[in-house]
Image (tube, rainbow, N blue to C red):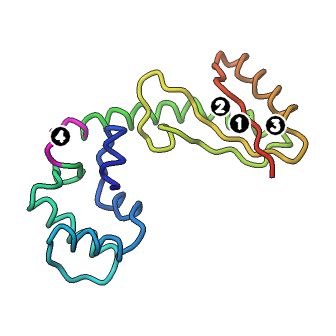
Amino acid sequence: MTLAYSAQFEFPLTSNEIKQRLMSAQFVGKVVKRQGLSMRANSKSSTTGLALVQLVKKKLVATNGRYYWLAGDNHAGWAQLRKKRTKISQQLRQELALVKRILRFFPKVVAAGITGSLAMDNAKQGADLDLILITKPDSLWINRAGVLLMALILGKKILALAEWSR
């Protein structure tokens, strides 16, 4: 399931990323049993590593030695694509550094986070900066106006601003 989800974004995973995204060693054990694989391991890390080896041997999963993806879809080029998108993401993060410095002057902004493809280092050329801002109560609209003004000055397009309240 983890590899199938990442395939939707043309994003092969390292073994560590697969381990991070799995729910538990028991879940991996169920997949191992369902696929008829044989192994003994008691931690999520070792179970996942052994499962990957077995899945590659059974040709259910493919690898280039660093990244893994579902076999049969011929996604060997995804490793190079991921490298390219990581570079684009790094450039976008540099642009984001200016936004971050400006947001420090917004006293009612409690936190700011990166979302979307940039958060995964999988941004395509021309991708936007997806941010989530958490503000103090009753300050959304003043922050909204400030962010829109900042975007206008920086020449950035704002696609949407939404409010969430408790």
Number of the front mark, 4 or 2? 4
As drawn, the label of residue 73 is 4
Q: Amino acid at mark 4?
A: Asp
71 sits left or right of 157 in the view: left
Query: Of residues 13 and 102, which is closer to you in this image?
Result: 13
Q: Quadrant of the N terminus?
A: bottom left
- Which dot, 3 or 4, sits closer to the camera? 4
Question: Label 1 amino acid?
Answer: Arg
The magenta stretch is: 71-78
Q: Secondary structure at mark 1?
A: helix
Q: Residue 113: which quarter of the image?
A: top right
User: Helix, strand, or loop for circle 3?
Assistant: loop
Q: Is residue 11 left or right of residue 132?
A: left
Residue 49 located left or right of residue 130: left
- Lower sequence index among marks 3 and 4: 4
Q: Residue at x 28, y 75 (%)?
A: 29
Query: Where is mark 2, residue-wise?
Result: 98
The single residue placed furthest to the front in the displayed view is 34
- Foreground of the two, 28 or 101: 28
Where does residue 18 sit, x and y in percent of width and height?
Answer: 34, 59
Q: Was residue 75 drawn as part of the magenta stretch in this picture?
A: yes
List x then y, in percent, for residue 37.
Answer: 15, 72
Q: Which residue is mark 3?
A: 105
**Numbered tag placed on residue 101 in the rendering:** 1
Residue in the image at 21% along x and 64% along y:
52
